[in-house]
Amino acid sequence: MSTNSENQCDYLVVGAGASGCVLASRLSENPENRVILLEAGGSDASPFLRVPGLGFAAGAIAKYNWNHLLEPIPELHDRQMVLLEGKVLGGSSSINGMIYTRGHSSEYDQWRDMGCTGWGFDDLRPYFLKSEANFRGAGQWHGDAGPMPLRRANPQLPICDAFLGAAGAAGLPIVDDLNANHPEGLGFYDVNIHRGLRMSAPRSFLHQAKRRGNLRVITRTEVLRIVFSHGRATGIEARQHGVETTFSAAREVIVCAGAIKSPQLLLLSGIGPADDLRALGIEVAAHSPQVGKNLQNHPCYRPRFACSQKVTARNHLSPAGMVRAGYSYAVSRTGPLAESFASVGGFFRSDPDLPLADMQVVMLSALSPQGSQGLLGLLPKEQGFGLTIYQGTPYSRGQVRLRSCDPLAAPMVVSGYFSDPRDIAVLASGVQRMREVMRHPEIARYISAAVAPKDTVRSKAELIAEIRREAATSYHQSGTCAMGSDEWSVLDSRLRVRGVTGLRVADTSVIPRLPNAAMHAPALMIGEKAAAMVLDDAVR
């Protein structure tokens, strides 16, 4: 296979998720840099990916999702789960809940203390702020000149206010800004929604950048492997519309394919545990035993409650409610269609004696049917709401491995959920605390029944058994190409792949320890910092 001149560039970015879009945009700000951004999925033009109020359905549409099937989970009765990851321009930023949270500064200081020089919070703050155009204006915790607009969620539903009222009555701090470094706090989220549209990574970072003559954004191109010459990454082999082709990079290849696909691509390219690669017939480019290891995610449990009054998002599905919602959106891009399905939540301690929150809770202002099929099946049939309660700092670790040397075969994803027994006990404690919040009259007056867990589930042991039956996963996967200071870390602190040259990884797979936050803001930050390091190294 030969490379035509159009497929030659200086910087080749693999994966147009949050980090990849930021990287391509920032690198192409210099008109002398020729940049190509490759994405396996297609366009993000669908209303399901643009209209915030339809976002609840985005992850259920198969063509926008990798739909990684996890291996059976021993600690959950060998149940299998599907791990969502965006396969579309924008990656998961095009299908997520539009929540923008960073986590506490001390969590990034732990990265620095683990040997990741330059990754403490004071080092990272400028890159967090660089992406933002926050409605609060510039300050200690926010920027106002970045490409991504952020505003406070405004669901205008009584059940959301009732939840915060009950949490406050239970002693949880109710805060104005969930990104202002509170040890614990609940409130309305900042969301990346502007003028009634989801401000995904491509809409924020590529919308203007694509007009630059030095940036090409190419979709529906699945990368098969990285090409090396004398130990240096010089390009990639890919498949476009069933035809194999190549792309070459004069300076660097930067992999931003996410915490499942990035390690898979490294392994397919000969970077990983040497014996495992040889057993699959893959030529070893660099022995790197930690590739695919250290997989982290936020396991969760979802309590659900039926309501006796018309106080939830079910109101919008009445004939009159749908007319009002459609009219508001058509006329002024406001109303429920302009809001995220996840507007209220925050961070709390599973144990009040902890110094810092170790849990997340997201309130979902509707009660979706369990086991629903199809998009219409996701719509609530009755008044009610749910909570998604995440363990924010899990001890358990999983891994990503190859099933074969076929680059189009799905990888083997072992979640590791609850393999460390401390995790399920912590999650159960967090669920218990939220159940106590639900007993406060501010919200209890609206609840007609506890759908799950039932009121008959009383002891912690019974709750742990319930979690084993019904626990779910978040889509905050990270850690599988972790940076570190030791020689066996996959990456150094400048995100360069050890053992080869001309190759970096820049996405949530680089994270050594998962923060107690959603992954959208950290992914944007990683893209910003990676771009700065690439540009800095280019002039050395």
Image (tube, rainbow, N blue to C red):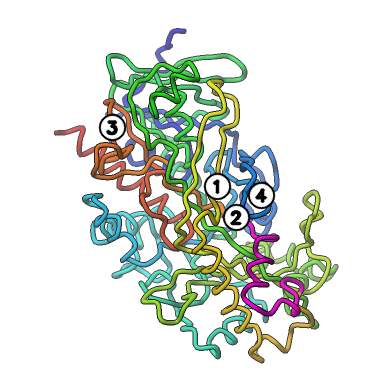
Q: Are marks 2 and 1 in contact (CB under 8 Å)?
A: yes
State how far apart marks 2 and 3 are (Cα): 31 Å
Q: Choose between 313 and 430: the one closer to the eye.
A: 430
Q: Amino acid at mark 4?
A: Ala
Q: Which residue is mark 4?
A: 58
Sequence order check, earlier mark of 3 and 4: 4
529 on left or right of 465: left
Q: Residue furthest top?
A: 1
Disc 1 to disc 4, C-alpha distance: 23 Å
Of mark 2 and mark 4, the one earlier in the sequence is 4
> Which residue does the numbered mark 3 point to in the structure image?
498
Which secondary structure lies at badge 1? Answer: loop
CA separation, marks 1 and 3? 25 Å
Q: Which residue is mark 2?
A: 473
Instruction: Please provide percent x and percent y for residue 341.
Output: 64, 64
* In this rendering, position of residue 317 left or right of residue 472: right
Query: Which amino acid, by three-letter code, is at mark 1?
Result: Ser
529 with respect to 481 (left or right): left
Q: Nearer the viewer, residue 51 or 365?
A: 365
Instruction: Identify the amino acid type marked 3.
Output: Arg
> Looking at the image, is mark 1 or mark 4 earlier in the sequence?
4
**Depth order, front residue of 379/211:** 379
Residue occupying image coordinates x 31% and y 33%: 497
